Image (cartoon, rainbow, N blue to C red):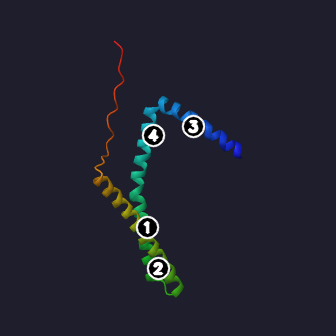
Amino acid sequence: MHRLLKLSLATSVFLTPVLAFAASDGIFKFISMIKSLIEGLIPVVIGLAVLSFLWGVLQYVVAKDEDKQKEARGIMLYGIIALFVMVSVWGLVNILGDTLDLSNTAPDAPAIPSLP
């Protein structure tokens, strides 16, 4: 197992520049696709956290047993914690981006000179 790990690490170290130069346009498209996928998943995850909180509220209201109410409070607590963490991280990223004056656009790549 140790030998396989060394071999895969060495292979990846030597092939990374080759892949980067061979398919730089493809890599940028792949990264852009991953970015758009993550941007699309953020509202879904926040929505799931809201739904889990609301599910906990519904379970708490419907529950007649103290154990069921305790379980529902846990679901509500985890939903609120998840919402707080996600929105806080999102806010911190925006604050850092505004403070450091970071932009969302990539700089133009230099043109490759051509021979006459």
10 Å neighbourhood of mark 4: few (<14), some, or many (≥20)?
few
Whether residue 107 is situated above or below residue 97 in the rendered picture: above
Gap in angstroms between the C-alphas marked 2 and 3: 49 Å
> Residue tagged by mark 4?
30
In the image, residue 12 lies at what x, y percent?
A: 58, 38
Q: Are marks 3 and 4 in contact (CB under 8 Å)?
A: no
Q: Residue at x 33, y 40 (%)?
A: 106
Q: Which mark is residue 13?
A: 3
In the image, residue 32 lies at what x, y percent?
A: 41, 42
Whether residue 39 is situated above or below residue 113 in the rendered picture: below
Which comes before the other along the chain, label 2 or label 1? Answer: 2
Nearer to me, 70 or 23 = 23
Inspect this view and state whether residue 65 appears. Answer: no
Gap in angstroms between the C-alphas marked 2 and 4: 42 Å
Q: Residue at x 36, y 14 (%)?
A: 115
Amino acid type, label 2? Arg
> Residue tagged by mark 2?
73
> Residue tagged by mark 1?
82
Which mark is in front, 3 or 1? 3
10 Å neighbourhood of mark 1: few (<14), some, or many (≥20)?
some
Which comes before the other along the chain, label 3 or label 4? Answer: 3
